[in-house]
């Protein structure tokens, strides 16, 4: 194998990882600065092959309509809606950006990546029914959730979700909420479509089977990356003014290699997952919704059980899960040494502190790993009482790496969200974490642009372009009812989605 090292090449921007985050940032930067040169490196042989792939992606179209973990019940019995409103705002920003790309002809076929599908929350038991009713009343106060419907009437629930109600104990207390304007987003298809267009643009180069081996900062503030061509074994150096690490579970080891002070103290806790995939077309035909329930005590939010209708490669699918598991890999295609090699002197104490505080999570994961096929079927039967083993098969889902961060007061804290870590000078940024991730990619990248391109972000040119790409840019849609309703209706028409009913 040839191990020759080529001389350095220069580019303005390097994007590491060909997932939804890099695709979103790459397209935004080319819109804002058409003359920028961008080099994209992906370790695998195609785009969206890890976290952005439809089978690996635990949540599609997260808009906080049905995910109960975004609306916790507070000690006083009230329901906190702040996070749900923020996520709903972020998803609206994503839809605005995709609509802009459709209008520009950059994306040509919205139904290939986004479709309307009702989002539902479903609970049973008196206490949970009371919580869901309070959640519904709290969310309805905000115009982003004004179309939400609630019912504890079994006849109505049977119309909404016949499979879920079929064979259920008639005396059981049940309730559900429903949002007709929910969506199913295939982030794998969307990412590939964006990269297919991006790589045709001047100054953009996308290379698969290329791995970043080292990142070194230069005296002038730029970065030199050593890149290995995995197909030929050749190494080369590439110099860039700005580097984005958007490598999913692979981001933490690369952040550690960068040695930026802001990256010290971060750790990662990997969680793997599995789906039950329905193989009976008659069963698939009878369910048309994303139905989310309540997570078990101690389980990570990404493990919220849901019975999920999806469109994957043009075919309707029905999944249940995800069932959590534990693997020391940071990526599905990663190494079992990923977790041990990520432990450094700077993060060992936060990681130990987070481990001690999250013993229920550890116990939950051990229980999940020990599950038998019958255990998994029993979990499915809570949502689908008539489920039969022969109608379902096990499918491996993606790896997620939850962020462990060093908190000056609490020590190590396990975070269930996404975290942008950037250098003080804005020359490098990394995205760590998981859910709601892909659905909020646009707002995450807007945050990154404001941190890393401070000299450009407030120029009239960039401000005007931002507002063209995302008309609500700079405004909180959760507080701007008229604008939110107008933009939601417009984006729904452009993307071919269910248009909200005016109330």
Image: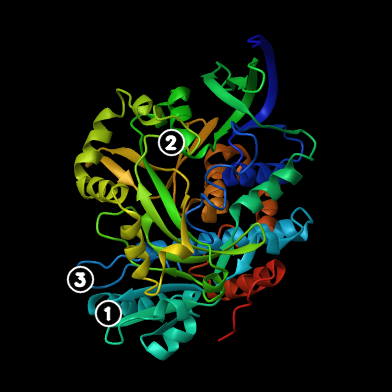
Considering depth in this image, is 218 or 430 the residue closer to the camera? 430
- State the image coordinates of residue 503 (x, y, percent, origin top left): 55, 86
Left or right, 157 with respect to 247, comes to left
Q: Do the residues labelled 2 and 1 touch (CB within 8 Å)?
A: no
Whichever of callouts 3 and 1 sits on the residue coming sooner in the sequence is 3
Q: In this view, does 4 lie above or below 114?
A: above
- Disc 3 and disc 1: Cα gap in Å? 14 Å
Q: Position of residue 455 (x, y in %)?
A: 60, 37
Q: 251 or 285: which is nearer to us?
A: 285
Tell me the distance, in whole angstroms, between the alpha carbons under discs 3 and 2: 38 Å
The local crowd at label 2, few if under 14, some if 14 to 19, many if 20 or more residues have their Cα within 10 Å, is many
| Residue 128: x %, y % from top left | 27, 74
Q: Where is residue 306 in the image (x, y as percent from the top left)?
A: 42, 64
**First in sequence: mark 3 or mark 2?**
3
| Residue position marked by numbered label 1 in the rendering | 130
The residue to which callout 2 is attached is: 330
Question: Mark 3 highlights which residue?
Answer: 76
Label 1 packing within 10 angstroms: few (<14), some (14-19), many (20+): some
Identity of the residue drawn at 70% across and 72% down: 493
């Amino acid at each position: 194998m040839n191990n020759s090292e080529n001389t350095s090449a220069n580019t303005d921007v390097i994007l590491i990882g060909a997932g939804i985050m890099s695709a979103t940032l790459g397209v935004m930067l080319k819109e804002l600065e058409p003359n920028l040169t961008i080099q994209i490196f992906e370790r695998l042989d195609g785009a969206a092959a890890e976290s952005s792939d439809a089978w690996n992606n635990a949540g599609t179209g997260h808009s906080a309509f049905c995910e109960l973990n975004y609306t916790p019940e507070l000690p006083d019995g009230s329901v906190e809606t702040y996070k749900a409103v923020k996520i709903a705002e972020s998803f609206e920003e994503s839809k605005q950006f995709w609509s802009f790309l459709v209008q520009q002809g950059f994306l040509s076929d919205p139904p290939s990546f986004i479709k309307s599908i009702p989002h539902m929350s479903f609970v049973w038991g008196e206490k949970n029914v009371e919580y869901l009713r309070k959640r519904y009343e709290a969310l309805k106060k905000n115009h982003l959730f004004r179309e939400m419907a609630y019912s504890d009437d079994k006849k109505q629930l049977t119309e909404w979700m016949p499979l879920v109600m079929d064979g259920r104990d008639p005396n059981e207390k049940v309730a559900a909420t429903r949002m007709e304007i929910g969506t199913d987003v295939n982030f794998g298809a969307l990412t590939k479509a964006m990269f297919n267009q991006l790589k045709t643009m001047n100054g953009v180069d996308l290379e698969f089977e290329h791995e970043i081996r080292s990142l070194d900062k230069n005296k002038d503030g730029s970065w030199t990356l050593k890149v290995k061509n995995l197909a030929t074994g050749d190494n080369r150096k590439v110099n860039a003014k700005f580097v984005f690490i958007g490598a999913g579970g692979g981001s933490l080891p690369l952040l550690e290699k960068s040695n930026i002070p802001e990256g010290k103290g971060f750790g990662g806790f990997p969680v793997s997952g599995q789906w039950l995939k329905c193989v009976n077309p008659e069963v698939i035909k009878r369910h048309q919704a994303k139905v989310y329930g309540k997570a078990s005590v101690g389980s990570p939010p990404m493990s919220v059980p849901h019975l999920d209708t999806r469109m994957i490669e043009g075919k309707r699918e029905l999944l249940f899960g995800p069932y959590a598991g534990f693997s020391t890999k940071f990526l599905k295609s990663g190494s079992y040494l990923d977790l041990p090699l990520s432990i450094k002197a700077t993060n060992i104490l936060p990681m130990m502190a987070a481990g001690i505080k999250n013993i229920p999570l550890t116990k939950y994961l051990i229980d999940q790993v020990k599950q038998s096929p019958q255990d998994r079927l029993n979990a499915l039967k809570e949502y689908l009482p008539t489920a039969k083993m022969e109608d379902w098969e096990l499918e491996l889902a993606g790896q997620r790496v939850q962020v462990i961060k060093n908190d000056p007061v609490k020590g190590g804290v396990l975070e269930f969200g996404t975290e942008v870590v950037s250098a003080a000078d804005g020359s490098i940024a990394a995205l760590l974490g998981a859910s709601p991730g892909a659905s909020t990619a646009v707002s995450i990248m807007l945050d990154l642009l404001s941190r890393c391109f401070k000299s450009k972000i407030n120029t009239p040119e960039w401000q005007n372009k931002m507002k063209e790409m995302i008309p609500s840019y700079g405004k909180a849609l959760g507080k701007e009812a008229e604008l939110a309703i107008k933009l939601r209706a417009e984006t729904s028409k452009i993307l071919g989605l269910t248009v909200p009913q005016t109330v």
